[in-house]
Amino acid sequence: MRIRNEKTETGHLLSFISKSDPSDNFSFFFPVEGLDQFDTLLEITKGFEKCLEEWPGIYNYNGYSINKNIEKIFPEMDETRIYFFEQTECLSAELRFIESFGKALLKRFIQKQNVIFPDIVTGAMAAESNFYNRETTIQNMWELLCNNRNIQLRAPRRFGKTSLLNHITKHPQTGWQVCFVDLEGGDSAEKFVEKILAALLVKQECVSFLPDHLSGLYIYEMSQIEQLAILRKERETIQRDWKIYVETIFSKIENQSTDNHFLIILDEMSFLIEDMLSQKKNSIEDVTTFMNWFHDFRSRFNTIRFILTGSEHLPSFLNAYEIKSRLDDLESVQLNLFDEETTEDFIFLVLAGQKVVVSNEEIHVIKDLVGKPIPYFLQLLLDAICEVCKEQKSLSNADIVRIYEHRLLGSNSKRYFESITRQLDRYDRYKPRNTAGAKSILDKLALSDDPVAIEDLKTIWQQTAARIEQFDIILEIMKDDIYLAKDENDHIFIDSKLIKEWWQKHGIAGLR
Amino acid sequence: MKLSDHHIEFIKDKIPEPYNTPEKYGDFISPKIQHHGTLCTTVIAEVKKRIVFPLGEKYKHRFFCRIDTDHKTKDPSSIIDKIMRDDNAYTLDNFTTMKDLARFRIVCNFLHDVDEVSEAIKNDKLLKQKFNFETKNTIEEHPESRKSAERSIKFILEHKQQPGLFLEIQIMTQLSEAWDKKDHFLVYETRRKKPDKSDENFPDYLDAKMYAMGELLYVADNYFEALREARDETIQTEADKS
């Protein structure tokens, strides 16, 4: 792995020129050193040609020998869209063209992405061109919504749920309006309504859904402070009768959406419920009432659909409090990780964008190190690799392993895993000693080479004096929090190499 | 090159569907000549590394030569034109064996430089190992066999492992190149528009003038060569004295 040399003058330029608009064109430049590279250059040239067959009739494809500077080879040539590569980036160890890389690259152009190479996003939301390859899940969700189903989106932490929902919000299907509501910070039914109102206020296209006295005020144009002042004023009305308030808004949406559909995305639903529960003594009753109301409420509409999600799996979480979730009407959609090929394509594109030349073998080293390609942890590793590679100019496989061990598992990596440790600490909210029980389970799983039988884990759980009736519930919650999974024998294991190694290194020493 | 009605008719008749239109025939031709383009790039890189760069270092006090990569691979319209012109020598089935599908040019300062580059190419071990060579030297060609005023050394390289895959390297002086570029515009392209009515496009008496200019530039090249030799001798004599 090394920083790409983009000063080379002699090479081969592969240009893709739109058949309908020749000014829409882009080129890849491959430096060439001599005759020994004839076969590999031909392999690459033919490889891209084959990839292009996936999108027939869009681009003309031409190759040009470049001797010195890449000047205007053809009249419409877009010199801002010439991308340097080295041959090794597109070739396997056997010197065969890696077709999936070629297709992944061309697809970015076909999709008209603003940024061809996804940026490294550590922690923040992956938006627009950095939001990578979730077309199948999105299509599946729209199909369900069009078939009048409401959705509960499920995925473990750091899988990119919020990024996915943000993408759906920004790019709705024709005939749909979407409103994204972040429920984090809410702790009551009233706050639930207030959060929905806050999300509607800032959207120009939602003006007509607001209560009559607000709809003519151009609130979406106001400053944040002015919007907050209006929200504060509305709070009193909401508190008098939150049900009437929200039902009035949704009736307006329903009545005005005869030709269109309206999708409301409720993110961090589990935080709302959890904070409701921690508010007062009778909160379980309140939550039960709220969940019953919400169940009836969402069944009333023909044109309004809901997507619910949260950092915790809501039914398991409510189960921990012995509350009936009333979410069985929702269609469950699982957001999965990238498959092997998509992960490799993604690593190739990200590193290519950072001008880092990476071989296919090195991509496998990265993939093997991180284990399950949980987007957040994969990006952390790629970020560290790029940083060190830019300092050192080149990295060996041993260097990559060292970066993983020092930067991701080293003593300074604590902050990367804070959300997990915080989550473990929250388990005691459900019942005392749950956290200690969960940590003991993790100890066992981290130290065991093989998956562990549930009965063995149950024994460990009991030894930690946690309540046995909480065992199944916490184990279910840990699936999303700590990436636990079951094998074909129903034995449990930590389905993330990184988390397992991190717990071995930093978790086991902790107090129980 | 712009397609004439004859070309379009040929494309419609001879090229298989769905490529038999002026818009799509390129998609039929281009994939078949990809390897010519890649061969050209790799040979340019090799010649640059092993021949042009060392000679440039040897003569670093003056301009020695440059590689000109204009029109490296024949464009599809020129290929169609050549298939139609060359009395069935080439067809849509065998056009990839045309000897000038891929080519590049090394433009030298003096006639002496043309010789030195040519010798270096001819004697390069790697090139000899990979290619069969055919040489056409029109610089000192006898007037009787001369078809054009162009003066160059052309190497036609055939890939030993892929027979039928050719690449042409042209070596000429700057003056010869200047003549060739003017001839290409004034005569060659004009004639190709109506090949059967060449007199209408470019009458013979003008052609004769073009020919004469070529000869004149060759005289100039010889004169410059003599001046170069005289200068080098003077410098050498001065050096010997000191």
Image: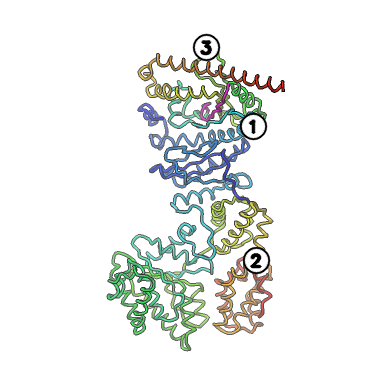
Q: Amino acid at mark 3?
A: Pro
User: In the picture provided, is B149 more to the left or to the right than B204?
Assistant: right
Q: Residues within 10 Å of mark 2 (few under 14, many from 20)?
A: many
Indicate the position of residue A484 as horizontal and vertical percent values: 59, 70
Q: Is residue A139 left or right of residue A382?
A: left
Q: Which quadrant is the C terminus of chain A positioned in?
A: bottom right
> Sequence-wise, which precedes: disc 3 or disc 1?
1
Residue B35 location, x and y as percent? 54, 35
Q: Residue furthest top?
A: B144
Q: Which residues are magenta?
A: B97-110
- Which is nearer the eye, A43 or B102? B102
Q: Would you name the residue on which mark 3 appears?
A: B143
Camera-side residue: B235 or B190? B235
Q: Same subunit under labels 3 and 1? A: yes
Instruction: Name, please, the residue furthest toward the front.
Output: B242
In the picture of the structure, the residue carrying the numbered disc 1 is B57
Helix, strand or loop at label 3? It is helix
Q: Nearer the viewer, mark 2 or mark 3?
A: 3
- Residue B22: which quarter of the image? top left
Residue marked by disc 2: A409
**Helix, strand or loop under label 1:** helix
- Residue shown at 61%/44% (left/top)? A95
Q: Is there one chain holding both mark 2 and mark 3?
A: no
Query: Mark 1 or mark 2, which is nearer to you?
Result: 1
Secondary structure state at the residue bearing disc 2: loop
Q: CA distance from mark 2 to mark 3?
A: 81 Å
Q: Is residue B207 above or below residue B8?
A: above
Residue B131, can we see it? yes
Residue at the limit of the structure toward the bottom, as seen here: A281
Chain letter of the residue carrying label 2: A
